[in-house]
Image: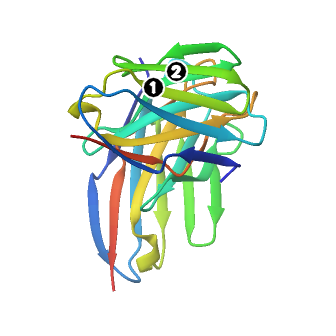
């Protein structure tokens, strides 16, 4: 059974801080790892990391995949209050048609 | 939003009544999913569909049924709602050959 664990469970920082969120996984056959951001509504897609694309960056957000350690990190630099959200990590199953989600990390950025 | 809508967006119902939630997508995605999200449990898969009339159970399917008679619509039915089914329900869709799922806006269901 595929498994995804995220840490920390929650995090409170001040604007301008840099944060690192962690995701570790166990899968039968690794295909990819996805990061989502969820504010007070539906999860929205951030990044997909694969064996051929282990690093992604978009503005102040970046993510790295460590296949040896079976983990990924999501970095947010110069945090803003708008970064406050739950960040979810997920991995697809062997067939690529189902995702297993981690429990999420709740980030709160204070002004 | 990948063209995914859900209805209703909010619903209050009583224990024992049937409830149907609708997910509609306009992008011709092959795969569609129903999740529930609860504090402390994250997103859990209820049922999914890999084509018209093709559905399968997810992790927490007890008490739920689904139907997909058209590519664009995926219905989730609670035959007899219970208070434990109070939750936020998300529909998602994924294109064939891809692995990224796109989510609808969610339905907040309260069972009294």
Q: Quadrant of residue A39?
A: bottom left
Question: Residue A75: x and y, percent?
Answer: 48, 62
> Height in image: A47 above or below B21?
below
Q: Chain of mark 1?
A: B
Residue at 66%, 32% (x, y): give it: B73
Residue A50 visible (yes or no): no
Q: How busy is the neighbourhood of tag 1: few (under 14 within 10 Å), some, or many (20 plus)?
A: some
Direction from residue B14 to residue A39 in the image, left or right: right
> Residue A103: where, in percent of width, then height?
34, 42
Q: Label 2: which residue?
A: B66
Q: Are marks 1 and 2 in contact (CB under 8 Å)?
A: yes
| Residue sitting nearer the eye, B73 or A6 | B73
Same subunit, labels 1 and 2: the answer reads yes
Q: Looking at the rendering, which quadrant does residue A106 occupy?
A: bottom left
| Residue in view at x 34 percent, y 53 percent | A105
What colouring does the structure picture have?
Answer: rainbow
Q: Can residue B110 be seen here?
A: yes
**For numbered disc 2, what is the local secondary structure?**
strand
Quarter occupied by residue B53? top right
Q: Decide if residue A33 is on the left or right side of residue A5.
A: right
Residue that mark 1 sits on: B77
In the picture, measured across the screen, residue A107 lies left or right of residue B76, that is left
Q: Residue at x 41, y 79 (%)?
A: A81
Q: Nearer the viewer, residue B34 or A54?
A: B34
Q: Chain of mark 2?
A: B
Q: Position of residue B60 (x, y in %)?
A: 36, 22
Q: CA distance from mark 1 to mark 2?
A: 6 Å
| Chain-order first, disc 1 or disc 2 | 2
Residue projecting furthest to the bottom: A111
On screen, residue B60 versus residue B30, left or right, reads left
In the picture, the quarter occupied by the C terminus of chain B is top left
């Amino acid at each position: 059974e595929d498994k995804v664990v995220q840490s920390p469970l929650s995090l409170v920082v001040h604007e301008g801080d840099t944060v690192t969120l962690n995701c570790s996984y166990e899968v039968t056959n690794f295909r990819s790892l996805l990061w989502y951001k969820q504010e007070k509504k539906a999860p929205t897609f951030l990044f997909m990391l694969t064996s051929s694309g282990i690093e992604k960056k978009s503005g102040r957000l970046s993510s790295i995949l460590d296949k040896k350690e079976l983990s990924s990190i999501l970095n947010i630099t110069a945090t803003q209050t708008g970064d406050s959200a739950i960040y979810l990590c997920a991995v697809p199953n062997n067939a690529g048609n189902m995702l297993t989600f981690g429990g999420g990390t709740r980030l709160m950025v204070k002004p | 939003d990948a063209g995914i809508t859900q209805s209703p967006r909010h619903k209050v119902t009583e224990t024992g009544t049937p409830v149907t939630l609708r997910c509609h997508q306009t992008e011709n995605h092959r795969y569609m999913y129903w999740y529930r999200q609860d504090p402390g449990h994250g997103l859990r898969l209820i049922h999914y569909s890999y084509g018209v009339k093709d559905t399968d159970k997810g992790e927490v399917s007890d008490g739920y049924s689904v139907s997909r008679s058209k590519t664009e619509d995926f219905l989730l039915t609670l035959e007899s709602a219970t208070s434990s089914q109070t939750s936020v329900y998300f529909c998602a869709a994924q294109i064939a050959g891809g692995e990224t799922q796109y989510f609808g806006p969610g339905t907040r269901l309260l069972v009294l």
